[in-house]
Amino acid sequence: MNVLARAGGLLADALLGLPLRATAYAVDRDVAVPVPGGVSLLGDLYRPRRAAGPQPVVLIRLPYGRTGMVAHAFAAPYARRGFQVFVQSTRGTFGSGGHFRPFTAEHEDGLATVAWLREQPWCDGRVAMTGGSYFGHTQWAVAPYVDPPLVSVSPHITAARITAAFYDHGAPLLQNALTWSSQIGRQEAGGLPAPIPRPRLAVKLRHALRRLPLQAADTAVVGAPVAFWRDFTTHAEPGDDFWSVADHDGADLARMPPVNMVTGWWDLFAAEQLADYRALRAAGVPARITVGPWLHGETGELKALVRTDVTWLDHHLRGGPAPKGAPVRLYLQEAGTWLEFDSWPPSRSRDVLHHLRPGGGLTEEAEAGDPEPSRFTYDPTDPTPTVGGPMLQAPGKQADNRSVEERADVLVFTGPVLASGLDVVGPVRARVYVRPELEHADVFVRLCDVDRDGASRNVVDGIRRLDPRTVPGPDVTVGEDGVLAVDVELFPTAYRIAAGHRLRVQVSGGAFPRFARNLGTGEPLGTAVAGRPCPFRVFHDTGHPSHVVLPVLS
């Protein structure tokens, strides 16, 4: 490692907030690994120059290339701390053989790679894995199955049920899917790296999101078909088992090694990742999780995952000190402080119901009587827009919702001014009693924080797609009067509603372009070309007490 590279490494450590280290290492490029189907995958081996004999290996598998930010932010920082690191390009990407069909080959390829590593003379048989997002998914595809087990894993900003990132309770996450398709569809064509704004591409994306049919939207943005987009639009129907190879939430979690995870309250994976943490602990797996105030891939999030992993890997691979503090570390938004708990959800939280009231009120007391339901009509030709929220890329997070709340297709229910602050910490959910005139419809619920000046900023939200093939079901029941009781799982959070602010709940029939508009016809996502308006009635009477449930920290 020359002087310039050493200086660059020290600068990278400083930017990541790591203690400066400069252990010398060498890199073997384009190391070929045979995997099923007669394919070879290429990887780069980072090996400490003074390594004496076989060493454990930190494996990172990803589809985004092995140089640039990946090398500087993920591989090199561990190598500078004396870890042996193997960074591998997944099938069909950056020199690796085969065809890149996201999420479908990582199980077999990952198992073959681990087996190959263990046979190498420079590996002592111990393998750990780390990485975020897609290279967090590659860990879930391996860790519950490999024998003997991995030493540890760090599947950051990802989820065992990876399809939650592109189908949320039946509603396709349109904007995230097309944004990611455009990224992977052009990533090997050169040009500006993905994080750098590209105004012309943004315009293409906006136009493509509104086009019908959706099947060829990838061509409109990238100029060629993208395998993931075609799979996303083709396999979006209930009961389609195409993605079963990609989801690993049904695996035997007791086989998992110790797990370290980082995510953000505005990361699209946060809800599923917290569910994963809870399931892992229930299975007896040692696990830790940090949740900060971050959007997916935000700088603070990347710093946190690398910093926590330096300690994590040192502990599990070299016997260093165990991580300090409680296993659950959460940032309390709008309070500027971190909280620590022994479990998720925190045992100190108690559920408080806030009921939707006729006339747009929101109170802890339910309505006593039989008032008329509130009404709105969702029109897919003028879909209800969304601002902010947990997104794949900025802009996301919080935004002022007042322009959306002024629309006739959004119901707004606002609570009284709070006399004291309210710390909402845990999963948020809602039950809304509705009667849509069409069988195919969406119910979108959003909780907002209204400040003293009237700005209404989103805190959490959730959606539920109604489909006659899945209704009734575990989350939707049909009353004798035909009214649907729809349970909507909103995102979890840790958020302080300040004294003097008010709670607000929105109810609508969509949130476009974050979610694909529901055309009301039941036609397949990729080929549908026309829609129908859907009138809704939302009930808030004695027999239909629509409400949100807030976990309030005691």
Image: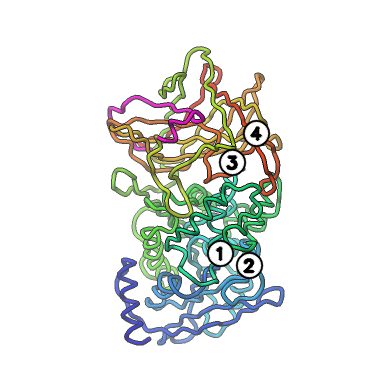
Q: Position of residue 167 (x, y in %)?
A: 59, 48
Q: Amino acid at mark 3?
A: Arg
Instruction: State the SS at label 2.
Output: loop
Residue 100, numbered label: 2
Q: Is residue 122 above or below residue 177?
A: below
Could you give the CA–CA distance between mark 4 and mark 1, rounded to whole angstroms? Answer: 34 Å
Q: Earlier in the sequence, mark 2 or mark 4?
A: 2
Q: Position of residue 315 (x, y in %)?
A: 40, 68
Residue 372 in the figure: left or right of residue 330: right
Going 36% across and 65% down the picture, which residue do you hit?
A: 307
Residue picked out by circle 4: 532
Residue 510 in the figure: left or right of residue 235: left
Q: Amino acid at mark 4?
A: Arg
Could you give the CA–CA distance between mark 1 and mark 3, rounded to whole angstroms? Answer: 24 Å
Q: Position of residue 350 (x, y in %)?
A: 41, 33
Residue picked out by circle 3: 517
Residue 374 in the figure: left or right of residue 49: right
- Tell me the quarter of the image containing the N terminus: bottom left
Camera-side mark, 4 or 3:
4
Q: Earlier in the sequence, mark 3 or mark 2?
A: 2
Camera-side mark, 3 or 2:
3
Residue bounds of the magenta highlight: 403-424
Q: Is residue 445 above or below residue 235?
A: above
- Which of these two is toward me, 123 or 232? 232
Q: Amino acid at mark 2?
A: Phe
Going 70% across and 48% down the picture, which residue do you hit?
A: 527
Q: Are marks 1 and 2 in contact (CB under 8 Å)?
A: yes
Q: Are marks 3 and 2 in contact (CB under 8 Å)?
A: no
Q: Earlier in the sequence, mark 1 or mark 3?
A: 1
Q: Amino acid at mark 1?
A: Ile
